[in-house]
Amino acid sequence: MPSFRNVRGWPRLNQICRWILLGSFLLLAGCGRPQGDALAAVLARGELRWGGDEEGGGPYIYRADDNAQIVTGFEFDLMSQLASGLGVRSRFESSNWPELLKTLHTGTVDVVVNGYELTPERLRDQIASIPYYAYELHLFARNDDSTISDWNSLKGPRTRGGSWRVGVLKNTAADSYMTRAFAGTVEVRRYEGTTDAFRDVENGALDATVTDTPPAVYYGKRFKVKQAGPAVERGWYVMYFRPTDIALRDRINDGLRKSFRNGSYRAILDKYGIWTEAQNELIRPETEILTETMRPGESAVDPWEIVRNNLPLLIKAAGMTLLLSVLAMPFAIMLGLTIALGRQFGPWFVRGPLAMYVEVVRGTPVLLQLYFIHFGLVPLLGLPDGVRAFAPIVSAVCGLALNYAAYESEIYRAGLAAIPVGQTEAALALGLTRRQALRYVIVPQAVRMVIPPVTNDFICLFKDTSICSVIAVEELSKRYNIASNDAPRAFAQLALVTALLYLMMSYPLSLLARRLENRPGRSVR
C-alpha cells in the first residue's frame, strides 16, 4: 500500500498544517490571556465595551417603541454618561444574561452591567463597583385574583389545591428568595425573560410572579396584574469587573459618585420612572463599602460534593427530558406518517395544505413555535385550573411533536417513494384494495426502511427539549444551567454528569435501532 508521505506535495501540506495549528494555539493563548491594564486598553481604543442582555427588556436595555434602531434604557444612559466621563465612547455588547460573567472573563467586554445583584458568590471570581441601584422584590398577581393579597397568602394552602405557582427570572435574587422562604408551599417556575412570567400570570398559568423594582415599575402597568403586599428583601445592583481590573473599577466608581451627587443619575432614573426613596442610600458611606465588607467565604467544598448534592435534581430533570421526548415523538411519528401518506397518495386539495404545513414548520424556528403555542394558543383554550398547572408541559409536547412531525413526514415520504411500484401492483393483483395494499404491504416496508433516520431524530429530540426552558419547563439542560450558575467552580463536573445522563438516555435507542434493523422481516400474507 503506498504511503501518503510519498505523495507529491505532502511535505509542503504537512508543513502548512503545522503552521496553522501553531497559529491557532497562539491565537487561543492570546485570547485567553488576562488583560494587564483594562483602563489603559479602554483609553487606547477610545471606547468602553460593556455587556448586557437586550432580551431582558425595559427599563434596563431595550429598543425604543417609536424607533427599533435606537437602543435605550437607564443602564444604557448610565454607561454613556460614565464612558463620556472617561473621555471615550460607550459600546454595548449584547449577550445571554446567565453567561454574561463568563463573557467578561473572555475579554470580549470590560464590564458587565445588567441588573446583576451583589452576592458573595459572585465576588469569588469578580470584583464589583459600588452599588448603583437599590432594588426590592415585588409580588404580582392577577387583577381578578382575590386569593393572593400579600406575601403571607403564599405561606398558606392554595385554595384551588396543589402548590402556589410563582414565576421568577432564573438565577436572580427573586429565584433565591422564593426557593428559600416558600419551599413548602410554592412551586417556583424559572423563566428566561421577565415578560414571559407576567404573561403566564395574566393567562392563568401562574398564580403570581416576583420581580425586582425596575421591571415591577416598568411592566406592572403593562399587564393585567396588581401588586400584592409591600416590597421586601432590599438588595443592590453592581457592575462586575475582572479581578485584575482594579484601576478601571475605581474610575467607574468615581464616575458613579459624581453622578449621584450632581443629580445627573437621578435625572436618568426619573426619565424611566424608577427613582425611589431607597436610591438616597447610594451616597451613604456604609453602602459604598458593601462590596468590600461582603467578603465571600472560602469555598472549600469539593466540586464533586456539589455534583452529589445536585444529582437528585439532575436526575429529576432528566426524567422531565425523558417524559417530553417519549410523549412528543410518538405523536410526531403518527402525524408525520399521516402527512406523508396524504402528500404521496392524497388528492390535490389535501396535498397542498400538507405541503404548506411542512414548509412553514421547517422554515420557522421551534422557539418561535413554542412561544406561539404557549402564549398565543393555550390562553385561548380556556383550560380549567387543574390543566393550566401543566400548561408548560402540554405546550412543550405539542410544540415538539408538531415541529418534528414535519421532518418525520419527509423521512416517511422518502421511504414510501423508495418502495417499487411493482409491490403495489402485485398486491392489487392478489385482490387487495389500495388501502389494504398500503396498510399491509407498502407502509410496513417503508417503516422498516426509515428506522435509522427516525431513531436519529428521536435522539436529537432529547437534546432539543432544552429549548422548552423558555416556557419554564425545567428539563435537564435548564437544571444544569441553574446548578452551574449557583456553583461556577463545579461547572465542568456538572457538565460531565449532565452529558452522561443524556448519553444514558440516548444510547439505548441506538442499540434498539440496530436490533430492529437486523430483525428478520415477516412475510406478508
Image: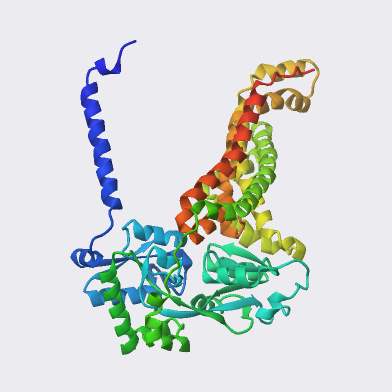
Q: Residue 465 placed where, x, y %?
A: 59, 49
Q: Number of marks in the image?
A: 0
Foreground residue among 14 and 404: 14
Residue extending furthest toward the front: 300
Q: In terms of image quadrants, where is residue 524?
A: top right
Compared with residue 473, is residue 128 higher up or lower down, i.e. above or below?
A: below
Q: Is residue 252 left or right of residue 120?
A: left
Q: Residue 375 placed where, x, y %?
A: 62, 62
**Residue drawn where x is 24% and y is 40% of the image:** 23
Confirm whether residue 368 shows in the render: no
Q: Is residue 94 left or right of residue 390?
A: left
Q: Is residue 24 left or right of residue 453?
A: left
Q: In terms of image quadrants, where is residue 62?
A: bottom left
Q: Say which quadrant the C terminus sits in.
A: top right
Residue extending furthest toward the left: 44
Q: Say which quadrant the N terminus sits in.
A: top left
**Residue drawn where x is 67% and y is 26% of the image:** 516
Compared with residue 469, is residue 232 higher up or lower down, i.e. above or below?
A: below
